[in-house]
Amino acid sequence: MVTSVASPPLDVAAAIDGGRWSAYQKLTLVLLALAFAVDGLANQALGLAIPALVAEWHVPRAAFASIAGAGLVGVTIGAALGGMVGDRLGRRLGLIGSVLIFGLATLASAATRTPGELLMVRFIGGLAIGAALPSGTALIAEFTPVRQRSLAIAVGMMFIAVGGLLASVLGALVLRPLGWRPYFVIAGALPLAFAVLFIATLPESPLFLARRPHRRSALLSLLRRAGIDAPADCTLIERTSAQERRPITLLLQQGMRRNTLALWMGFFFCLLASYTMFSWAPTMLTSRGFNVSQSSIGMSAFSFGGVIGGLLSGWLIGLVGSRRSVLGLALGAAAGALVLGALARGPTPSFALLLIALPCEGLFIAGLTNGVYTLAAFIYPPHAKATGVGAAAAIGRIGAVVSSYTGVLALQLGGASSYFLVIAIAALLSFIGVAAIRAHVPRVAR
């Protein structure tokens, strides 16, 4: 008589953490990096177009503070809602829906005729831009082995800077000869094209599937594509109790409260510094006598530094852990802003020197941004990861909203020096928040 032996239980999270980083998982990271790239492109499109809009619509640059602010309010709300959508309906659905919406909104920006119309469109686009990152970050974290997780998140987040670089290059090529309407058409068409690709190829998070027994067959298929041995008769284990499934309350419960509040502080001031650069640096450069193309080139240099900073951040976190690496990047961002303030002072600032300093500042700010996102993905358990990342990003986006007003106010009151001083102070305050976090990512054993 032959007795069949049941397959041992399979802990989904442990199988992913202990498995190899398969080609399929790397391909998924590539897809998510492309999603982050078009997110960055859509997010930065307005800042680069503001000088051209000011010239055509004959309105003061301060009028665009409300437009930029409305977009960032949308991003703030979207980041919080997107995390909840990702936890409840799926990371895949949340991400693809977001890309479709902000692509359509960016495309619609080309048809606006008044600041009021542009404000409405940017708010809608902002909702989707904010909603994309929590689901995308959670999907990377939950589909990557623990040894490569920090690097994978850093690579994905780095592509936000790649999107900014693409926005800047498009601005240099399109804004001056063709105008801002064709610029928005191109910036909106690219996300729509990628959304079609994601519908056909992007998988769902295995940990999200593990919490839904009726999707067992989809989970088994996904695990096998990732190179994990998952017999058809195995019992799949997901380590979340019913009592734990309260992600919003979990974030502020005893034992998590300090990390959450410190992370929120780090996010708030990190994104205040980051968006002050994204939203107002082109306007600052044109106010110092540089033309639209030179401003776009300057932002291309800043975004190129951000690409390097994204990779550097992931490597440093794996090498020495998140505490030393992220705190060092925050100090570098503060020092870089002070140097830029000194270079921009005076009647005839050197564009060549700015082109050297801008990528250095981009490196530090993007590295700091990637670091706080990596911390958010590390601090929270799987069932609350998208909500935790989304809540932190939403708090950070409030800082981004504030940047819509602090940036233009600093330019009006003190010019370039005050503008860069705001960025330096924000980076130092982000440093304080990150320093207060207890649960830092440890260095990866070699």
Image (spheres, grey):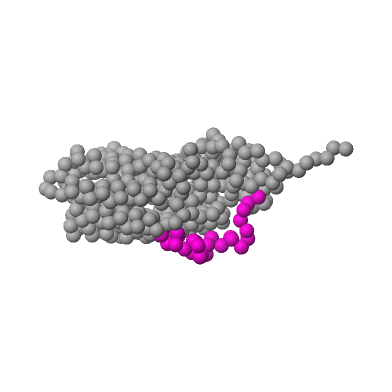
- State the residue at coordinates (38%, 40%): 312
Q: Quadrant of residue 177?
A: top left
Instruction: Give the image location of residue 325, x and y in percent.
Output: 38, 46
- State the residue at coordinates (50%, 57%): 387
Q: Look at the image and say whether residue 392 sits in the magenta stretch.
A: no
99 left or right of 295 in image: right
In the image, 23 versus 124, the foreground residue is: 23
Q: Which residues are magenta?
A: 237-263
73 left or right of 152 in image: left
Q: Residue furthest left?
A: 347
Q: Residue furthest top?
A: 23
Q: Look at the image and say whether residue 244 sits in the magenta stretch.
A: yes
In the image, 116 versus 87, the foreground residue is: 87
Q: Is residue 428 above or below residue 325?
A: below
The answer to whether residue 374 of the structure is visible from this angle is yes
Instruction: Give the image location of residue 280, x and y in percent.
Output: 27, 52
- State the residue at coordinates (33%, 50%): 330
Q: Quadrant of residue 354?
A: top left
Q: Quadrant of residue 308?
A: top left
> If the image is split into quadrants, where does the N terminus sit?
top right
Instruction: Give the image location of residue 229, x and y in percent.
Output: 65, 38
- State the residue at coordinates (52%, 44%): 146
In the image, 134 versus 426, the foreground residue is: 426
